[in-house]
Protein backbone atom coordinates (compact mmCIF):
# COMPACT_ATOMS: atom_id res chain seq x y z
CA UNK A 1 0.00 0.00 0.00
CA UNK A 2 1.37 3.42 -0.96
CA UNK A 3 1.28 6.08 1.75
CA UNK A 4 3.12 9.14 2.89
CA UNK A 5 6.36 7.21 3.16
CA UNK A 6 5.66 5.53 -0.19
CA UNK A 7 5.68 1.90 0.89
CA UNK A 8 5.99 -0.57 3.73
CA UNK A 9 9.62 -1.06 2.67
CA UNK A 10 10.25 2.64 3.31
CA UNK A 11 8.70 2.29 6.74
CA UNK A 12 11.03 -0.60 7.55
CA UNK A 13 14.00 1.43 6.31
CA UNK A 14 12.96 4.16 8.71
CA UNK A 15 12.93 1.76 11.63
CA UNK A 16 16.42 0.54 10.71
CA UNK A 17 17.63 4.13 10.49
CA UNK A 18 16.18 5.02 13.87
CA UNK A 19 17.82 1.99 15.50
CA UNK A 20 21.15 3.08 14.04
CA UNK A 21 20.81 6.62 15.40
CA UNK A 22 19.73 5.40 18.82
CA UNK A 23 22.74 3.09 18.90
CA UNK A 24 25.00 6.02 18.01
CA UNK A 25 23.50 8.14 20.77
CA UNK A 26 24.02 5.41 23.35
CA UNK A 27 27.61 4.89 22.22
CA UNK A 28 28.29 8.61 22.42
CA UNK A 29 26.72 8.74 25.86
CA UNK A 30 29.06 5.98 27.09
CA UNK A 31 32.04 7.85 25.65
CA UNK A 32 31.06 11.05 27.42
CA UNK A 33 30.60 9.21 30.73
CA UNK A 34 34.05 7.68 30.34
CA UNK A 35 35.57 11.08 29.55
CA UNK A 36 33.91 12.60 32.61
CA UNK A 37 35.34 9.88 34.89
CA UNK A 38 38.83 10.39 33.50
CA UNK A 39 38.48 14.16 33.83
CA UNK A 40 37.49 13.88 37.48
CA UNK A 41 40.61 11.85 38.20
CA UNK A 42 42.98 14.31 36.52
CA UNK A 43 41.25 17.64 37.07
CA UNK A 44 43.24 20.18 39.09
CA UNK A 45 42.95 23.90 39.62
CA UNK A 46 45.34 24.51 36.73
CA UNK A 47 43.59 22.15 34.28
CA UNK A 48 41.13 24.57 32.63
CA UNK A 49 42.68 23.92 29.22
CA UNK A 50 41.76 20.25 29.55
CA UNK A 51 38.25 21.17 30.66
CA UNK A 52 37.81 23.46 27.66
CA UNK A 53 39.05 20.75 25.31
CA UNK A 54 36.65 18.24 26.83
CA UNK A 55 33.63 20.54 26.52
CA UNK A 56 34.49 21.46 22.94
CA UNK A 57 34.90 17.80 22.06
CA UNK A 58 31.41 17.02 23.38
CA UNK A 59 29.88 19.96 21.52
CA UNK A 60 31.56 18.92 18.27
CA UNK A 61 30.42 15.31 18.53
CA UNK A 62 26.84 16.24 19.33
CA UNK A 63 26.84 18.87 16.59
CA UNK A 64 27.81 16.22 14.06
CA UNK A 65 25.09 13.83 15.20
CA UNK A 66 22.14 16.17 15.76
CA UNK A 67 21.44 16.95 12.06
CA UNK A 68 21.11 13.21 11.42
CA UNK A 69 18.75 12.82 14.37
CA UNK A 70 16.69 15.80 13.17
CA UNK A 71 16.33 14.28 9.70
CA UNK A 72 15.32 10.97 11.25
CA UNK A 73 12.67 12.69 13.36
CA UNK A 74 11.25 14.41 10.27
CA UNK A 75 11.01 11.02 8.60
CA UNK A 76 9.40 9.66 11.74
CA UNK A 77 6.61 12.24 11.43
CA UNK A 78 5.96 11.01 7.91
CA UNK A 79 6.03 7.45 9.19
CA UNK A 80 3.36 8.29 11.76
CA UNK A 81 1.16 9.62 8.98
CA UNK A 82 1.88 6.48 6.95
CA UNK A 83 0.70 4.28 9.81
CA UNK A 84 -2.40 6.44 10.19
CA UNK A 85 -3.23 5.85 6.53
CA UNK A 86 -2.75 2.10 6.91
CA UNK A 87 -5.03 1.92 9.94
CA UNK A 88 -7.72 4.00 8.32
CA UNK A 89 -7.57 1.91 5.13
CA UNK A 90 -9.04 4.76 3.12
CA UNK A 91 -9.67 4.07 -0.54
CA UNK A 92 -10.25 7.18 -2.60
CA UNK A 93 -11.50 5.93 -5.96
CA UNK A 94 -13.67 8.01 -8.26
CA UNK A 95 -17.33 8.10 -7.25
CA UNK A 96 -16.88 6.05 -4.09
CA UNK A 97 -18.33 7.51 -0.90
CA UNK A 98 -16.01 7.57 2.09
CA UNK A 99 -17.88 6.99 5.32
CA UNK A 100 -17.24 9.33 8.26
CA UNK A 101 -16.41 6.77 10.90
CA UNK A 102 -13.75 6.42 13.55
CA UNK A 103 -11.28 3.56 13.79
CA UNK A 104 -9.61 3.79 17.20
CA UNK A 105 -8.27 7.34 17.36
CA UNK A 106 -7.90 7.64 13.58
CA UNK A 107 -10.37 9.97 11.97
CA UNK A 108 -11.78 9.22 8.54
CA UNK A 109 -13.06 11.81 6.13
CA UNK A 110 -16.78 12.55 5.84
CA UNK A 111 -16.42 14.07 2.38
CA UNK A 112 -17.36 12.45 -0.91
CA UNK A 113 -16.59 12.56 -4.61
CA UNK A 114 -19.28 14.35 -6.59
CA UNK A 115 -19.91 13.72 -10.26
CA UNK A 116 -19.56 16.59 -12.74
CA UNK A 117 -20.19 16.84 -16.49
CA UNK A 118 -16.65 15.70 -17.29
CA UNK A 119 -15.53 13.74 -14.23
CA UNK A 120 -15.50 14.13 -10.46
CA UNK A 121 -14.81 16.85 -7.90
CA UNK A 122 -13.91 16.21 -4.28
CA UNK A 123 -16.08 17.83 -1.58
CA UNK A 124 -17.73 21.25 -2.18
CA UNK A 125 -14.84 23.68 -2.69
CA UNK A 126 -17.00 26.64 -3.68
CA UNK A 127 -19.02 26.45 -0.45
CA UNK A 128 -15.88 26.00 1.61
CA UNK A 129 -14.19 28.92 -0.11
CA UNK A 130 -16.91 31.30 1.06
CA UNK A 131 -15.92 30.62 4.69
CA UNK A 132 -12.22 31.33 4.20
CA UNK A 133 -10.10 34.48 4.32
CA UNK A 134 -9.10 35.79 0.88
CA UNK A 135 -8.05 39.31 1.93
CA UNK A 136 -4.57 39.02 3.39
CA UNK A 137 -2.85 42.10 4.80
CA UNK A 138 -5.93 43.59 6.48
CA UNK A 139 -3.80 44.41 9.51
CA UNK A 140 -1.14 46.16 7.42
CA UNK A 141 1.09 43.12 6.94
CA UNK A 142 2.98 42.90 3.67
CA UNK A 143 3.78 39.20 3.50
CA UNK A 144 1.15 37.34 5.47
CA UNK A 145 0.13 34.69 2.91
CA UNK A 146 1.53 31.94 5.16
CA UNK A 147 -0.23 33.37 8.20
CA UNK A 148 -3.50 33.43 6.26
CA UNK A 149 -2.92 29.88 5.05
CA UNK A 150 -2.66 28.82 8.69
CA UNK A 151 -5.72 30.91 9.55
CA UNK A 152 -7.77 29.16 6.87
CA UNK A 153 -6.58 25.70 7.90
CA UNK A 154 -7.56 26.50 11.49
CA UNK A 155 -10.98 27.66 10.26
CA UNK A 156 -11.46 24.42 8.34
CA UNK A 157 -10.66 22.53 11.54
CA UNK A 158 -13.67 24.25 13.15
CA UNK A 159 -12.15 27.20 15.02
CA UNK A 160 -13.16 30.72 13.98
CA UNK A 161 -10.08 32.93 13.98
CA UNK A 162 -8.60 35.99 12.29
CA UNK A 163 -5.38 36.81 10.48
CA UNK A 164 -4.47 39.28 13.23
CA UNK A 165 -4.86 36.73 16.01
CA UNK A 166 -2.71 34.14 14.25
CA UNK A 167 -0.06 36.77 13.46
CA UNK A 168 0.14 38.13 17.01
CA UNK A 169 0.71 34.71 18.54
CA UNK A 170 3.16 33.66 15.83
CA UNK A 171 5.16 36.87 16.06
CA UNK A 172 5.34 36.76 19.84
CA UNK A 173 6.77 33.25 19.65
CA UNK A 174 9.24 34.02 16.86
CA UNK A 175 7.38 32.01 14.21
CA UNK A 176 7.13 34.78 11.61
CA UNK A 177 8.88 38.00 10.64
CA UNK A 178 7.43 41.51 11.34
CA UNK A 179 5.49 41.44 8.05
CA UNK A 180 4.04 37.98 8.69
CA UNK A 181 6.47 36.07 6.48
CA UNK A 182 6.84 32.36 7.29
CA UNK A 183 8.44 29.18 6.03
CA UNK A 184 6.97 25.65 6.04
CA UNK A 185 8.55 24.69 9.35
CA UNK A 186 7.21 27.82 11.05
CA UNK A 187 3.72 27.23 9.65
CA UNK A 188 3.90 23.67 10.93
CA UNK A 189 4.67 24.99 14.42
CA UNK A 190 1.89 27.60 14.20
CA UNK A 191 -0.66 24.90 13.36
CA UNK A 192 0.60 22.76 16.22
CA UNK A 193 -0.31 25.61 18.61
CA UNK A 194 -3.92 24.97 17.56
CA UNK A 195 -3.61 21.18 17.95
CA UNK A 196 -3.35 20.56 14.22
CA UNK A 197 -0.75 17.95 13.34
CA UNK A 198 0.98 18.29 9.99
CA UNK A 199 4.02 16.96 8.18
CA UNK A 200 6.27 18.16 5.37
CA UNK A 201 6.45 16.33 2.06
CA UNK A 202 7.77 16.79 -1.46
CA UNK A 203 5.45 18.87 -3.64
CA UNK A 204 4.06 16.27 -6.05
CA UNK A 205 0.62 16.13 -7.61
CA UNK A 206 0.11 12.48 -6.67
CA UNK A 207 0.75 13.20 -3.00
CA UNK A 208 -1.60 16.21 -3.18
CA UNK A 209 -4.37 14.03 -4.60
CA UNK A 210 -3.88 11.35 -1.95
CA UNK A 211 -3.88 13.87 0.88
CA UNK A 212 -6.92 15.85 -0.27
CA UNK A 213 -9.05 12.77 -0.86
CA UNK A 214 -8.25 11.58 2.67
CA UNK A 215 -9.81 14.76 4.10
CA UNK A 216 -6.54 16.59 4.67
CA UNK A 217 -5.54 20.10 3.61
CA UNK A 218 -2.38 20.76 1.63
CA UNK A 219 -0.34 23.98 1.92
CA UNK A 220 1.74 24.61 -1.21
CA UNK A 221 4.69 26.94 -1.75
CA UNK A 222 4.40 28.53 -5.20
CA UNK A 223 5.89 31.32 -7.26
CA UNK A 224 3.13 33.93 -7.39
CA UNK A 225 4.43 35.39 -10.65
CA UNK A 226 4.02 32.07 -12.44
CA UNK A 227 0.72 31.28 -10.73
CA UNK A 228 -0.75 34.63 -11.82
CA UNK A 229 0.88 34.58 -15.25
CA UNK A 230 3.01 37.64 -14.49
CA UNK A 231 6.37 38.38 -16.07
CA UNK A 232 9.48 38.80 -13.95
CA UNK A 233 12.98 37.51 -13.39
CA UNK A 234 12.73 36.82 -9.68
CA UNK A 235 10.75 34.23 -7.73
CA UNK A 236 7.92 35.66 -5.66
CA UNK A 237 7.26 33.04 -2.93
CA UNK A 238 3.61 32.61 -2.03
CA UNK A 239 1.63 30.27 0.22
CA UNK A 240 -1.75 28.83 -0.83
CA UNK A 241 -3.89 25.91 0.31
CA UNK A 242 -5.45 23.18 -1.81
CA UNK A 243 -9.04 22.45 -0.81
CA UNK A 244 -10.16 20.11 -3.59
CA UNK A 245 -9.09 18.16 -6.67
CA UNK A 246 -10.85 17.29 -9.91
CA UNK A 247 -10.43 14.14 -11.98
CA UNK A 248 -11.68 12.86 -15.31
CA UNK A 249 -14.06 9.92 -15.49
CA UNK A 250 -11.13 7.49 -15.24
CA UNK A 251 -9.80 9.07 -12.06
CA UNK A 252 -6.87 10.89 -13.64
CA UNK A 253 -6.01 14.12 -11.83
CA UNK A 254 -6.95 17.11 -13.98
CA UNK A 255 -7.11 20.17 -11.74
CA UNK A 256 -6.73 21.53 -8.20
CA UNK A 257 -8.94 24.02 -6.41
CA UNK A 258 -6.98 26.63 -4.48
CA UNK A 259 -7.89 29.04 -1.72
CA UNK A 260 -5.50 31.96 -2.21
CA UNK A 261 -5.41 34.54 0.58
CA UNK A 262 -4.68 37.14 -2.12
CA UNK A 263 -7.76 36.20 -4.18
CA UNK A 264 -9.81 39.29 -3.30
CA UNK A 265 -7.16 41.62 -4.71
CA UNK A 266 -7.15 39.58 -7.92
CA UNK A 267 -10.94 39.60 -8.25
CA UNK A 268 -11.11 35.86 -7.56
CA UNK A 269 -12.99 33.74 -5.02
CA UNK A 270 -11.77 31.37 -2.33
CA UNK A 271 -12.12 28.46 -4.74
CA UNK A 272 -10.21 29.05 -7.95
CA UNK A 273 -9.42 26.00 -10.08
CA UNK A 274 -6.05 25.60 -11.80
CA UNK A 275 -4.96 22.83 -14.14
CA UNK A 276 -2.32 20.38 -12.96
CA UNK A 277 0.10 21.90 -15.47
CA UNK A 278 -0.45 25.43 -14.12
CA UNK A 279 0.22 24.34 -10.54
CA UNK A 280 3.25 22.24 -11.44
CA UNK A 281 4.72 25.19 -13.36
CA UNK A 282 4.23 27.47 -10.35
CA UNK A 283 5.62 25.16 -7.64
CA UNK A 284 8.88 26.13 -5.97
CA UNK A 285 10.40 22.67 -6.34
CA UNK A 286 13.04 22.95 -3.63
CA UNK A 287 10.45 23.77 -0.99
CA UNK A 288 8.21 21.38 0.90
CA UNK A 289 4.44 21.32 1.18
CA UNK A 290 2.57 20.88 4.44
CA UNK A 291 -0.05 18.16 4.77
CA UNK A 292 -2.42 18.29 7.75
CA UNK A 293 -4.14 15.57 9.69
CA UNK A 294 -7.65 14.66 8.57
CA UNK A 295 -9.75 17.80 9.21
CA UNK A 296 -13.08 17.15 7.48
Image: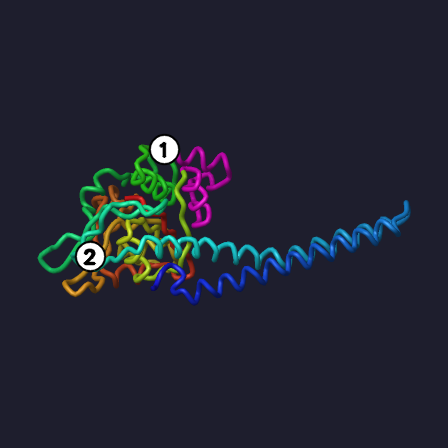
Furthest residue toward bottom: 9
Q: Image point 58% across, 57% down: which residue? A: 67
Locate residue 153: give its quadrant: top left
Furthest residue toward front: 104
What is the number of callouts on the image?
A: 2
Per the image, label 2 sits on a secondary structure element best described as strand
Of residue 1 and residue 153, the one placed in the foreground of this image is 1
Furthest residue toward left: 117
Q: Image point 49% across, 62% down: which residue? A: 14
Residue at the disc numbered 2:
246
Of residue 257 and residue 164, the one placed in the foreground of this image is 257
Res. 262 visible in picture: no
Q: Percent x, y for residue 214?
A: 29, 52
Identify whether 187 is placed above or below 158.
below
Specify start and end residues of the magenta stretch as a single range: 166-194
Residue at the disc numbered 1:
139
Q: Image point 31% across, 44% down: which residue? A: 295
**Does residue 169 appear left or right of residue 19 in this picture?**
left
Q: Percent x, y for residue 231?
A: 30, 58
Locate residue 280: give its quadrant: bottom left
The answer to if 90 sits in the magenta stretch is: no
**Does residue 240 appear left or right of residue 123 in this picture?**
right
Per the image, label 1 sits on a secondary structure element best described as loop
**Does residue 103 appear left or right of residue 69 in this picture?**
left
Identify whether 131 is placed above or below 294.
above
Earlier in the chain: of badge 2 and badge 1, it is 1
What separation in Å lies between label 2 and label 1 (alpha carbons)? Answer: 34 Å
Amino acid sequence: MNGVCGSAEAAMALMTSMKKHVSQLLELNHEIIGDVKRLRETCRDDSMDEMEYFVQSCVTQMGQLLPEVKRALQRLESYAAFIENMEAGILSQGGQKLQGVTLGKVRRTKQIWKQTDDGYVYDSPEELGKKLDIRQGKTGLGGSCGICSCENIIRISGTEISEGTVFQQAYQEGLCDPQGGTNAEERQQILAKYNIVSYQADQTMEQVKIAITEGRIVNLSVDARKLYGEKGLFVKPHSVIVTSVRTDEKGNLMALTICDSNAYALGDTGAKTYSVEEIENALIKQRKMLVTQVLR
